[in-house]
Image (tube, rainbow, N blue to C red):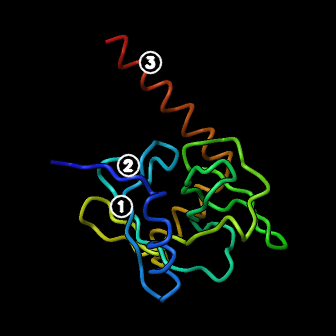
């Protein structure tokens, strides 16, 4: 039996584990980090971050209480612009006070993808371009329409 937990119930525990130098594994919900992170299939290992840079995946808490796992598009003076890999609209104004941790490992099913590996960094290099995303989203839309017509 799969049981779902609310992250807010474990916020203190997550922060304590990260503050002590440990890692905390989460199983993200939603589609905002597709195609990299698939809901129900993949997980992410978080660690304490000491400053984020462009391309990092951050786990943060919005002012409205929502927990979010998105990529840093721009980092400047302690403020970040974030965007999910499956999105085109950036979220501005995220500050260090919002940040809980940074993704250090991604598990695609049982396969480990370290966030410092060459294949991952290559993915980030191309995927952080909104032009590449737009092309991908357009091609995906066209292929879905073709499949529906068959």
Disc 3 is placed on an element classified as: helix
Circle nearer the viewer, 2 or 3: 2
Disc 2 is placed on an element classified as: loop
For the C terminus, the image quarter is: top left
- Give the labeled residue for mark 1: 43
Q: Residues within 10 Å of mark 1 (few under 14, many from 20)?
A: many
**Residue sitting at the far left:** 1
In this picture, residue 114 sits left or right of residue 112: right
Q: Nearer the viewer, residue 132 or 10?
A: 10
**Residue sitting at the far right:** 77
Circle nearer the viewer, 3 or 1: 1
* CA distance for labels 2 and 3: 22 Å
Residue at position x 33%, y 56% in the image: 42
Residue at position x 40%, y 65% in the image: 44
Residue at position x 69%, y 53% in the image: 63
Disc 1 is placed on an element classified as: strand
Rendering quarter of residue 67: bottom right
* CB atoms of marks 2 and 3 within 8 Å: no
Residue at position x 60%, y 38% in the image: 135
- Looking at marks 3 and 1 on the same chain, the residue that comes earlier in the sequence is marked by 1
Identify the mark at residue 145; answer none if there is no mark. 3
């Amino acid at each position: 039996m799969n049981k779902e937990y609310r992250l807010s119930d474990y916020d203190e525990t997550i922060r304590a584990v990260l503050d002590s130098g440990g890692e905390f594994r989460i199983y993200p919900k939603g589609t905002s980090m597709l195609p990299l992170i698939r809901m129900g299939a993949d997980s992410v290992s978080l660690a304490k971050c000491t400053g984020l840079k462009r391309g990092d995946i951050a786990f943060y808490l919005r002012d409205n209480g929502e927990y979010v796992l998105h990529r840093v598009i721009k980092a400047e003076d302690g403020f970040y612009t974030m965007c999910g890999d499956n999105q085109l609209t950036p979220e501005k104004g995220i500050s260090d006070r919002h940040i809980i941790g940074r993704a250090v490992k991604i598990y695609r099913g049982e396969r480990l993808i370290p966030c410092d590996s060459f294949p991952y960094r290559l993915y980030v290099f191309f995927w952080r371009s909104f032009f590449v995303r737009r092309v991908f989203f357009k091609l995906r839309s066209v292929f879905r329409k073709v499949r529906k017509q068959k």
